Image (cartoon, grey):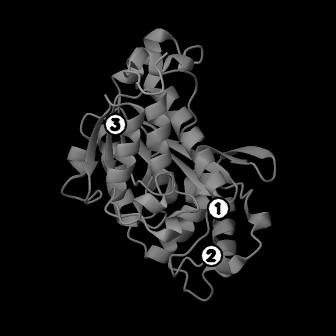
Amino acid sequence: MASRDQKPAFRYDEAFSRNLGWVTPAEQQALRGKRIAIAGMGGVGSGYLLTLARLGVGAFHIADFDSYDIPNLNRQAASYMSTMGVPKVEAAARMAQDINPEVEIRQFGDGVNASNVAEFLQGVDVYVDGLDFYAFSARQLVYGHCAAHGIPATMAAPLGMGASCLNFLPGKMSFEDYFQWGDLPEVDKALRFLVGLAPAGLHRSYLVWPQGVDLAQRRGPSTSMGCQLCAGIAASQALKILLRRGDVLAAPWGFQFDAYRDKMVTTWRPGGNRHPLQRLALAFARRHFVGNTPDTRP
């Protein structure tokens, strides 16, 4: 053990030795050779990066065009007063490299767009979605590329004091088939995303101040508990995908865990947002969160 005045040298095998048991030594070395893309370094994305870095994953592509600001402090893993004004990719990468100095991180400081999506996803083993709820064009772009190139993708959404999860795997239902966004206006995409993320709606019963949700104004609440649960869930799904270990639920299957209500529900919505129950939920959400906005869905 090093003295207080002498910092120990980093050694990969020692740094991640406490993972062993839940992974084998061979699996830990396999994780060292994996590459993960994470778009968004905000509410959930920075948590994904740090959790997966502590798992010993060896390489990342991370994307975000934003810098940290005061409203980020309630939930974002790399948001501190010391990182205010710092580009999110830089702050998050610095923290991951402080965990594992050997980790390889490619930063995409302009976010993900049509000119760099191929480079962002090149050579990655899995995509983990950390984009802002309202990043509609970027999300369609990335998932479209994943579907076209056989890249598995996982998303976990912080909802209240819980999290929901959907996986989009090669050969299974795609993001577009599930959410049915197409060329709809943004408010309709927001509605379909909100309802499609968590068909069970476990979080709805304790929304104590509905004024905090306004889809038309791109406003919604989030908690640190939900974001931290997302990190655990998304990293666990990524581990199963990377190591080909155990069953991975793929859309139209999904699940939601709510720590406030002590409940876990597995959902199945064949047809995604075309399912009759989803259409009812969409109508309910429109009345409560959008007001008199016309219904433009087909």
CA gap, disc 1 to disc 3? 27 Å
The residue labelled by disc 1 is 278
Q: Position of residue 55 (x, y in %)?
A: 48, 28
CA gap, disc 2 to disc 3? 35 Å
Q: Which numbered dot is residue 213?
A: 2
Q: Position of residue 291 (x, y in %)?
A: 63, 86
State if disc 3 and disc 2 touch (CB < 8 Å).
no
- In the image: residue 40, left or right of residue 157: left
Q: Nearer the viewer, residue 178 or 137?
A: 137
Amino acid, disc 2? Val
Farthest residue toward the bottom?
Answer: 292
Q: Residue at x 40, y 39 (%)?
A: 96
Q: Earlier in the sequence, mark 1 or mark 2?
A: 2
User: How would you rate the neighbour count of disc 3 (Cα within 10 Å): few for under 14, some for 14-19, many for 20 or more?
Assistant: some
Q: What element does badge 1 sit on?
A: helix
Q: Earlier in the sequence, mark 1 or mark 3?
A: 3
Q: What element does badge 3 sit on?
A: loop
